[in-house]
Image (cartoon, rainbow, N blue to C red):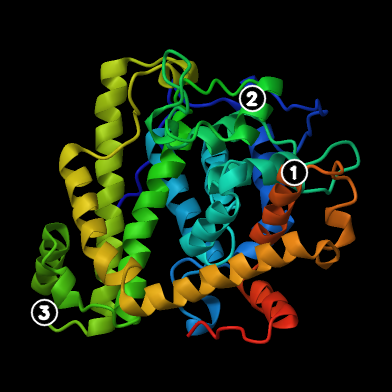
Amino acid sequence: MAIEAPRARAAYAADPAQSRGRLHAEALTGTRNPFRRDCDRIIHSTAFRRLAYKTQVFVFHEGDHFRTRLTHTLEVVQIARSLARALGLDEDLSEALALAHDLGHPPFGHAGERALDQCLAAHGGFDHNEQALRIVAELERRYPDFDGLNLTWETLEGLVKHNGPLLDATGQPAARYRERGVPAAVLSYSRRHDLKLADYASAEAQVAAIADDIAYDAHDIDDGLRADLFTLDAIADVPIIGDIAKTIKRQYPALEAGRRVHETVRLLITRMIDDVVAETDLRTRKLAARSADEVRAAREPVVTFSAAMAKSDADVKGFLYPRMYRHQRVAAIMADAEKVLRDLFDLYVREKAALPAEWTSDLPKGDEGARARRIADYIAGMTDRYALIEHARHFDSTPELR
């Protein structure tokens, strides 16, 4: 079978040679383009290493084969690079955005985010996308000339806007931020290094966002089956999975259960990628985009599912939500996890000496909002196991989360 030749670079692809640069100017390197350099900085960051011990759905000690934030991220990277290659986009920028997209998640997945959001209710709340920006623009401290990783404008705008514009055409917060406003850290950074918050992000950022959706669908099916939260026959009631099941049965009538699961997941990813490529080709031809900026200025995303596949994606998530994310077993563990983080937050507010001195030495005196945000930074950077260790060090009873 002949291997398909790589697609020629798309006219609307981001060009590292035309990058808008970094907040702090740096000399170019002869061995890596700016987007590749961003990938490498993210991989070598402390926040990236911590993803290995942060919850995706199941806490780390429930089993060695369940996804963590790190393994999820690596799967998103693989899908994002596949899409970027198929569309003629910049693979390094897509990879950088896939690598960074979950850096802002606290321990214990969305349960941890809910807990910190409640703790910071009087100080703007907690948003994992805002936290990712804070990490790469401020909290990582590795370089002598600046705080953060000093990533390119293209990586930062994609990190902030991969789910769409944050402002509408009138400059007001977009729908998802209408109630609480655009996160303060995003607005503050954008004032220094304008991220064009009313525009869409690059096609590469849109690729990373939809790769995240595809990876979620596929690996949550795999993990849910492994955890015995539902059966393969039950999820075959979802039309796209049922159709895949028929294809597998026709080709491999005697295939063992484990291989059937993996083939189901593999074919789902393949179908979704193929659909995104076809739909993106239709949209970009209609837009006649000749530059990355024309994609940013479009009135809708260009990298997306077709209407039919969007329905299938919603069907999969609709199946998983009550059977996995809200399953009694998972919900009970996550409720305990939320309490762990709330206990730690209250402790650090109440006992100032409990927070390491290096996290408080530069705080303005009497600024309770700044202190609360710094406490959240500290907790959000914890791994699941470190949060439990810290809780056990300060409290008489710590849940086992099993």
Residue 392 located left or right of residue 87: right
Q: Amino acid at mark 1?
A: Ala
Whether residue 267 can be seen here:
yes
Q: Secondary structure at mark 1?
A: helix
Seen at 68% across and 33% down, the residue is: 34
User: Percent position (x, y) of residue 6?
Assistant: 42, 39
Q: CA distance from mark 3 to mark 1?
A: 61 Å
Which mark is first along the chain, 2 or 3?
Answer: 2
Residue 31, compared with residue 166, is above or below; it is below
Q: Which residue is mark 1?
A: 370
Q: Which residue is mark 2?
A: 190
Which mark is first along the chain, 2 or 1?
Answer: 2
User: Percent position (x, y) of residue 28?
Assistant: 78, 29
Q: CA distance from mark 1 to mark 2?
A: 19 Å
Residue 232, compared with residue 70, is above or below; it is below
Seen at 46% across and 72% down, the residue is: 335
Q: Amino acid at mark 2?
A: Ser
225 or 123: nearer the viewer = 123
Seen at 45% across and 77% down, the residue is: 333
Please identify, in this view, whether the residue under mark 1 or under mark 2 is nearer the observer: 1
User: Percent position (x, y) of residue 109?
Assistant: 50, 63
Q: CA distance from mark 3 to mark 2?
A: 56 Å
Q: Which residue is mark 3?
A: 253
369 or 254: nearer the viewer = 369
Tell me where residue 306 sits by quadrant.
top left
Which mark is first along the chain, 1 or 3?
Answer: 3
